[in-house]
Image: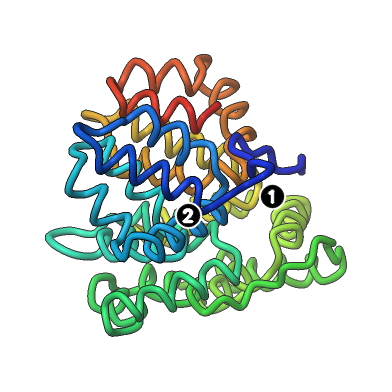
């Protein structure tokens, strides 16, 4: 797997208070200086933005988010607010929004829980408890059901091995266990699938997928398609996509946000803000490879004004 390629990097000679002062001037002056907001917030890493947020509150006894909400509007406001929030809190809010109201955004839940490291998921869960007064598991249980609920609850337990090397012998054992839990029997032992898919490392899962296909005359994906249905099937298949090529999976999510029926700005903002200082460079490459056009071109076609400028700055 190639190394992560961010598109936003920490600035050297970083001064959180100076940035907070510049943001305050851009917000509190006569009219709002959107260009200054973009120049600062779109060129700082997640940790630097968190430091600016704290410095702003310390200096002005006001919350940067509330100031942005009062002075800005529309999707540009949403990007700026997303950038000023600690990542764990941003993702907790996204989880909550995916489950609140009518209907559930199953794809968003899998995207967030399937891609987070153990530490990121633990921090998101802690932020969720702080924000909403109850564990995220309560809302998962209340808003989903059956096999899909079981998959999400397994992911939120943060039991994934995070070592980088694969154990071939163990991968053969797990591949056989998956075969016996699914294709080899009448009915499906779902617990075996969840146990393996949510606890083995990414490298180990890639090895399991390869061993499964080599040991049997079909792929693990085809077994999942046969053994599971509805949201559980979709969730596991998306998880397997992440395992084999996470940037390609996220590129597909971005394409759906841009090219579906109208632009899904919430998904577009979350994907770009959460990945810009992680692996958005890799995602851009996969996007162009998969769809024959650049992410920048599609974002430029589908957005406008300060919102477009902010997103394009983050994409790089």
In front of the other: label 2 or label 1?
2
Determine whether, in the image, residue 32 is placed left or right of residue 111.
Answer: left
**Secondary structure under badge 1?**
loop
Q: Can I make out residue 169 in this image? A: yes
Q: What's the residue at 41%, 53% (across, down)?
A: 234
Q: Distance between the residues labelled 2 and 1?
A: 55 Å
Residue 13 pos. (x, y %) = 67, 44
Determine whether, in the image, residue 208 is placed left or right of residue 118.
Answer: right
Count neighbours of disc 2 (C-alpha within 10 A) and say few if under 14, some if 14 to 19, many if 20 or more: many
Residue at numbered disc 2: 52
Residue 98 pos. (x, y %) = 27, 59
Residue 156 pos. (x, y %) = 48, 74
* Quadrant containing the C terminus in the rendered view: top right
Q: What's the residue at 50%, 72% (across, down)?
A: 123
Q: Can I make out residue 180 in this image? A: no
- Residue 10: name its quadrant: top right
Q: What's the residue at 28%, 30% (across, down)?
A: 260
- Residue 28: name its quadrant: top left
Residue at numbered disc 1: 217
In this view, which residue lies farthest toward the left? Answer: 102
Q: Do the residues labelled 2 and 1 touch (CB within 8 Å)?
A: no
**Secondary structure under badge 2?**
helix
């Amino acid at each position: 797997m190639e190394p992560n390629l961010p598109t936003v990097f920490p600035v050297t000679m970083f001064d959180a208070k100076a940035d907070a002062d510049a943001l305050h001037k851009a917000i509190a002056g006569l009219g709002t200086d959107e260009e200054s907001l973009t120049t600062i917030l779109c060129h700082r890493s997640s940790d630097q933005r968190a430091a600016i947020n704290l410095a702003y509150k310390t200096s002005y006894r006001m919350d940067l988010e509330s100031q942005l909400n009062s002075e800005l509007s529309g999707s540009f406001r949403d990007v700026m607010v997303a950038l000023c929030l600690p990542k764990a809190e941003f993702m907790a809010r996204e989880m909550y929004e995916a489950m609140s109201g009518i209907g559930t955004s199953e794809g968003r839940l899998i995207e967030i829980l399937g891609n987070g490291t153990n530490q990121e998921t633990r921090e998101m869960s802690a932020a969720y408890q702080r924000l909403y007064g109850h564990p995220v598991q309560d809302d998962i249980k209340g808003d989903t059901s059956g096999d899909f609920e079981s998959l999400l609850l397994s992911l939120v337990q943060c039991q994934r091995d995070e070592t980088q090397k694969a154990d071939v012998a163990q991968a053969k054992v797990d591949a056989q266990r998956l075969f016996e839990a699914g294709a080899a029997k009448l009915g499906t032992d779902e617990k075996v699938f969840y146990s393996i898919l949510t606890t083995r490392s990414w490298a180990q899962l890639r090895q399991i997928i390869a061993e499964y296909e080599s040991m049997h005359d079909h792929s693990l994906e085809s077994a999942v398609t046969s053994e599971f249905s509805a949201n559980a099937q979709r969730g596991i298949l998306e998880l397997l996509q992440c395992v084999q090529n996470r940037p390609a999976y996220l590129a597909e999510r971005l394409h759906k946000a841009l090219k579906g029926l109208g632009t899904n700005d919430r998904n577009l903002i979350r994907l770009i803000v959460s990945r810009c200082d992680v692996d958005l460079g890799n995602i851009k490459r996969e996007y162009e490879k998969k769809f024959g056009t650049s992410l920048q071109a599609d974002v430029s076609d589908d957005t406008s004004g300060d919102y477009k400028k902010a997103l394009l700055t983050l994409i790089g």
